[in-house]
Image: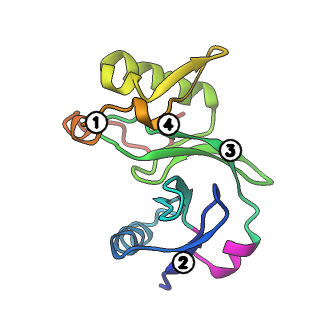
Amino acid sequence: MIIVKNTKCQSCHQTFELSNKQINLVTDLLNRGQKFIMIECSLCGLATNYQQKNDDIQNSAIEVDSYTYRCPVSHCTGWVELIEDSTSSFFGCGECGSVWYEEQNFQKEITQIVSLCNYRAKCYEMAENKWIPASLENEDKNYKTLVESEPFDKKKSFIRD
């Protein structure tokens, strides 16, 4: 299996080199069969979809919405993006692998996690009856530690619909 060490950020549109930690993460997830992997761009700091093939870096048909959400799955500190291509669209988390094909189900999970964990509420804002990501400055300084202390999600499927 070939691991591409450079990928193009879908937010800032710059090509960046993966860190050793990111290469290890990508290798592990690809070996487990995960095709959708989110990593942090070292240039702009936003989450982006890892592209496995060099050709895809320049010619990807995937478009990413401007919103990057914190994942609403219990015990996951990852990021969720809206991924759209010519045949489908879905919300996906590259860390836990969760996928939502229906926005209403994604929104419902945000509502559920916000009602259970007040520190999670700081990651989202309500606008026009929908959750949108809040500014990173709103996030609790101990966010990762708090989320990692949550119970593991019990769903057996990555597909959350």
Q: CA distance from mark 3 to mark 1?
A: 26 Å
Q: Earlier in the sequence, mark 2 or mark 4?
A: 2
Residue 126, by quadrant, is top right
Q: Secondary structure at mark 3?
A: strand
Residue type at tag 4: Arg
Q: CA distance from mark 4 to mark 1?
A: 28 Å
Mark 2 or 4: the one toward you:
2
- Mainly helix, strand or loop, the magenta region? helix
Q: Which residues are drawn in magenta? A: 51-58
Q: CA distance from mark 2 to mark 3?
A: 22 Å
Task: Answer few, some or many: residues within 10 Å of disc 4's Cα (few below 14, many 20 plus, some between 14 and 19).
Answer: some
Location of the C terminus by quadrant is top right
Q: Secondary structure at mark 2?
A: strand
- Residue 19 percent across, percent down from the top left: 39, 73
Residue 57, by quadrant, is bottom right
- Residue at 36% x, 67% y is 25
- Residue at 64% x, 81% y is 54
Specify whether residue 72 is in view. Answer: no
Q: Nearer the viewer, residue 7 or 156?
A: 7
Residue 14, above or below 120: below
Q: Earlier in the sequence, mark 3 or mark 1?
A: 3
- Residue beneath disc 1: 141
Residue type at tag 2: Asn
- Residue beneath disc 4: 160
In the figure, is residue 127 to the left or right of 146?
A: right
- Residue beneath disc 3: 65
Residue 6 has which mark? Answer: 2
Mark 1 or 2: the one toward you:
1
Q: Secondary structure at mark 1?
A: loop
